Image (tube, rainbow, N blue to C red):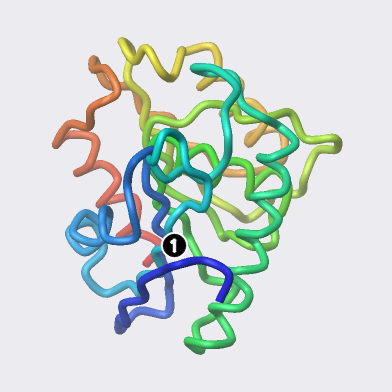
Amino acid sequence: MSFIHRFEPGTSDTTLLLLHGTGGNEHDLIGLARDLSPTAKLLSPRGKVLENGAPRFFRRLAMGVFDEVDLKAQAADLARFVQEAAERYSFDAGRVYALGYSNGANIAAALLLLYPEVLAGGVLLRPVLPLEPPTLPDLSGKAVFLAAGRRDPWAPSERVEALARWLEQAGANVELRWQDAGHELHPEELEAARAWLARRV
């Protein structure tokens, strides 16, 4: 298949697409995902782009400046991979939620904006608006949980709010949760994400 990945079976009809942050791999979010949703199936690819040896899901030109051409190409590749994986592992392609952190949350946002058919929604931890799509997608019926830090140097509040606006304008049910934190995650917001997932998984 097109990504190095890990698949873990589960008893739920829902599959979580695990998307790691910069420097992570296909194993990084397995423990968190099992804690947040014990019954979900887990599909965890490794980003193909290397930045000084650190895996990512798309290139950036500078800190906070994304290579949009590469982002679009990598999002298309990831969308194809999810469809391939649904066939190989026999899971419901209409019941896939992203669980992404940082760079992984941003590629999840790109999937929602460019390939809305791939995801039913997602938990995006420390995301920003990665790009403005050429047309507004139809995200009606989809739900997205955004967890952002008020003091996050990598995810400025205006870019987080821009993402929330785009998703809402496209028809998604968006819950934006702010934490008095930086880029690191806190137990309170993970508990909120767990409750959000429990209502859907």
The answer to which quarter of the image holds residue 109 is: top right
Report the residue at 61% width, 30% height from top: 130
Report the residue at 65% width, 50% height from top: 75
The residue identified by callout 1 is: 45
Q: Is residue 112 above or below residue 66?
A: below
Closer to the camera, 186 or 154? 154
Residue at far left of view: 187
Three-letter amino acid code of the residue under disc 1: Pro
Report the residue at 35% width, 79% height from top: 12
How many marks the image carries: the answer is 1
Image coordinates for residue 155, horizontal then vertical, percent: 44, 19
Q: Say which quadrant the C terminus sits in.
A: bottom left
Q: Is residue 33 left or right of residue 96?
A: left
Closer to the camera, 122 or 200? 122
Residue at far front of view: 52
The answer to which quarter of the image holds residue 76 is: bottom right
Closer to the camera, 154 or 169? 154
Closer to the camera, 201 or 77? 77
Image coordinates for residue 19, horizontal then vertical, percent: 42, 52
- Tell me the SS state at disc 1: strand
Report the residue at 64% width, 34% height from top: 168
